Amino acid sequence: MANYSDTALGKGTVYSDQYDPSLLYPIPRHKARQAEVPVAFVGVDLWTAFEISWLNAQGMPQIAIGEFIFPCTSEAIVESKSFKLYLNSFIQTRFESREQVHDLLVADLSAATQASVDVILYDIEEYNGLNPIAEPKGSCLDHQQVTIKTYQPDANLLSADTDQIVTETLYSHLLKTNCPVTDQPDWASVYIQYTGPAIDRVGLLEYIVSLRQHQDFHEQCVEKIFADVLSHCHSTELSVYARYMRRGGLDINPFRSTHQTTPPRYRQVRQ
């Protein structure tokens, strides 16, 4: 496992409420991935920030919900605690306009990740209207009677019936992984949309549960699921989308696909 002792995770923290872009801590994707991902994919990491606030020129607090879209090809990801500290640094800083805040967010995050980052700031009512709580049309795996034998990733649990070609969406609310630095639990719902040989649903659920004690960042967990399903189930098209629960006002939602560059527009009820 890569060494992340130089990050802010798991350490005492001094909080700043004055704008400070130096708080952002990038982690090279190649370090987080630790090895070349054995399959090609496209996609993004969609972060949602529910605790964004600053002062306008008259000192009146402003609030917004932010979406941050990082391409999976960026040179770096942003360490999540540093992202929270960075957003907190806006709290008591005066800005002339919402546009100024938006432009700073774009510039700082793009510089940190060495990629073009898209930022959208929503009013509360606007966000709720555009991002309804919903589930996709598909089948939930979680009500199957399954005997679990391992809580460490085992891709050999995956298989598919090559005599039956389908297009379907399967999902589970039972994905749980651990932070590679603090070992805190990370909870998620994972959505797998594919075309190809019919995936064995019992084996897929066993595989998802087998990640329960796995330590890695959200992005790498999704890339692992994507690579394992693609290589063991031989899908011709595949998308894997994990909606992780928020911590410190931030949720991280990685999306990886063979063909689709952006994830669908919905959020899970626990979000």
Image: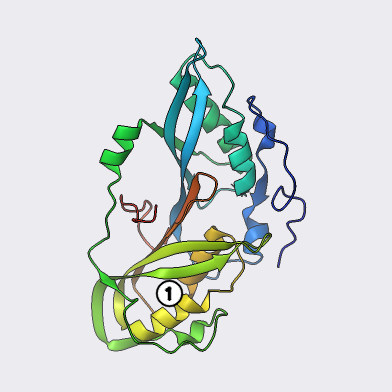
Q: Is residue 257 visible?
A: no
**How far across and down, in percent of the image, does residue 161 sit?**
31, 88
Does residue 207 appear left or right of residue 18 in this picture?
Answer: left
Q: For the residue carrying disc 1, how many other residues have a C-alpha within 10 Å: few (<14), some (14-19), or many (20+)?
A: many
Does residue 136 appear left or right of residue 116 in this picture?
Answer: left
Q: Quadrant of residue 119?
A: top left
Residue drawn at x 52%, y 24% is 54
Q: Quadrant of the N terminus?
A: bottom right
Does residue 267 appear left or right of residue 137 in this picture?
Answer: right
Q: Nearer the viewer, residue 159 or 146?
A: 146
**How far across and down, in percent of the image, does residue 65 sit?**
42, 36
Coloring scheme of the render?
rainbow
Q: Is residue 9 visible?
A: yes
Residue drawn at x 54%, y 67% is 177
Which residue is denoted by mark 1 in the rendering?
A: 230
Position of residue 238 relative to residue 110, above or below, is below
Q: Quadrant of residue 256?
A: bottom left
Residue drawn at x 31%, y 87% is 162
Position of residue 128 relative to residue 168, above or below, is above
